[in-house]
Image (spheres, rainbow, N blue to C red):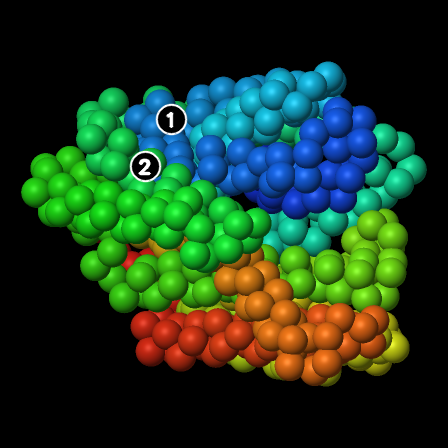
Amino acid sequence: MNAKTTNARWVALGALSLTQLIVSLGVTIVNSALPKVQATLGFSNGDRQWLVTAYALAFGSLLLLGGRLSDYWGHRRTLIVGLTGFAAASVGCGVATNYVTLVSARAAQGIFGALVAPAALAALAMTFREPRARAQAFSFYGAIGGSGVAVGLVVGGVLTQWLTWRWCLGMSAIVAMMALFGVIVSVPHDEGDHGVRIDGIGALLTSVSLFGLVFGFAHAVSNGWTNVGTWGSLVGSGVVGLIFWRWRADTAVPLVPHRMLRHRTRTGSLVALLTTSMGIYGVVLVLTYYFENVLHETPMRTGLYFVPLVVALAVSATVASARLLSSVGPRPLVPVGMVLSMMGMVLFTRLSPTASYASAIMPGLVLVGLGLGLILAPAIASVTAGTTPSVVGAASGLVTTAQQIGASIGTALLNTIALTTAGRYVRTHGGSTTDVLLRGTLHGDAVAFWWAAGFFGVGAVVSFFFLETGANELGQDA
């Protein structure tokens, strides 16, 4: 491989990692801007959730279809279309003058994000095939993508406090255009596999099922688990999901190929990504509430508090995962990462109103960051390893779907656990005095952190027994 080709590959890595960051930013960057957006456009508190939910619903429900379309159209073409659309939708967010326009633009971001995310991962998997280079590339990609949740809080807080909410929502357009330029100049052209048949019925069934799942968990956060919209959506999602699974078994060209989940390492990696997203997205939410409501920090300082997590994740991914994955495989890395993240969650259970950031908060963030760096790159690389060009998009769609479902479940469950436990504590300890409310909040947070630790504990057990030791490519059968 000549120097020019090698340089192009690493430029491609930067561009593809940037696309992953854009998708992650779309989830969290809006949170910091919500109060000022509401003040400007004048919508109700009940409508606030839709600025977050509109993106999540469109994104989560279309990921599997987006991955399959990238196999059909070609990953480079899909990225160009997706990034262009995402940039245009981001501009729409930044210039929106009313609530309906803003929510519509957020949904459009989610639709184009569902094209971008699996296509970027598929292009990365096809660009880096050699074990050593692959380990380095996926470690860098995982570090950028994994830090997106925290980076979104940092950037959102800074832009909202120092500029305006319009910059906060519209800046993704600038980043998307940078990524688009990188893709155009560095990602090789691929025609796609026009022999791939898109399972229209399967695509419809999965989209409906995933829509109901994401909507149900998002609805639970604001309306509770007994609300008919919550349990109706979740039950409906399950019923449609079962119909899809039966359809998948009978059809000759399923949206998720039959052979895709036969390998235990691929299945174990998807479970690892699911449980990791359940833990990290929920914990970031609970910690954000702790920083702002208990420590009374500004959105900008809240975002900056997550910087040690980002740094630790980057160090762990680029130093440990990049050097070890190609030689030892995913099994030694992912379970250790799960245990480290679990230990960080346990440290968070001891937070207090007067906790020192340096001694009580930062150690947990560092442990979680180190753990995530050992989990993400090996797990993502293992799902896409050994895939042929005709199904690598489908495998990438499974990765992003597992992460999105985990994020939805974790956010809803941990938020509900924290609030319910806090309310129960207040009722049994003498009413709504300031001191009791504060202690109740901290108790609810502690219980939520214990649950998050449990998610990572389950992930550690599953990954230990499912993943394989030693470098493997899962065989060219998927």
138 left or right, relative to 36:
left
Regarding residue 378, the answer to whether it shows in the image is: no
Hey, what amino acid is under mark 1? Gly
Q: Which secondary structure lies at badge 2? A: helix
Name the residue at 71% across, 71% down: 441
Name the residue at 75% across, 25% down: 41
Nearer to the camera, 289 or 400 = 289
Nearer to the camera, 353 or 419 = 419
Where does label 1 land, which residue?
Answer: 74
Residue contact between numbered discs 1 and 2, judged by CB atoms under 8 Å:
no
Q: Quadrant of residue 319?
A: bottom right
Hey, what amino acid is under mark 2? Val
Q: Position of residue 64 (x, y in %)?
A: 35, 39
Nearer to the camera, 394 or 193 = 394
Q: Reading the chain from its start, which is encountered first: label 1 or label 2? A: 1
437 left or right, relative to 327:
right
Please tell me whether residue 164 is drawn above or below residue 143 in the rendered image: above
Q: Position of residue 326 (x, y in %)?
A: 46, 64
Q: Residue furthest right?
A: 162
Q: Nearer the viewer, mark 1 or mark 2?
A: 2
Where does label 2 land, which residue?
Answer: 208
Query: For residue 331, which numbered disc appears in the image?
Result: none
Q: Residue furthest front?
A: 430
Please tell me whether residue 175 is drawn above or below residue 154 in the rendered image: above
Q: Which secondary structure lies at badge 1? A: loop
Name the residue at 34% across, 28% down: 69
Q: Marks 1 and 2, how far apart in space?
A: 25 Å
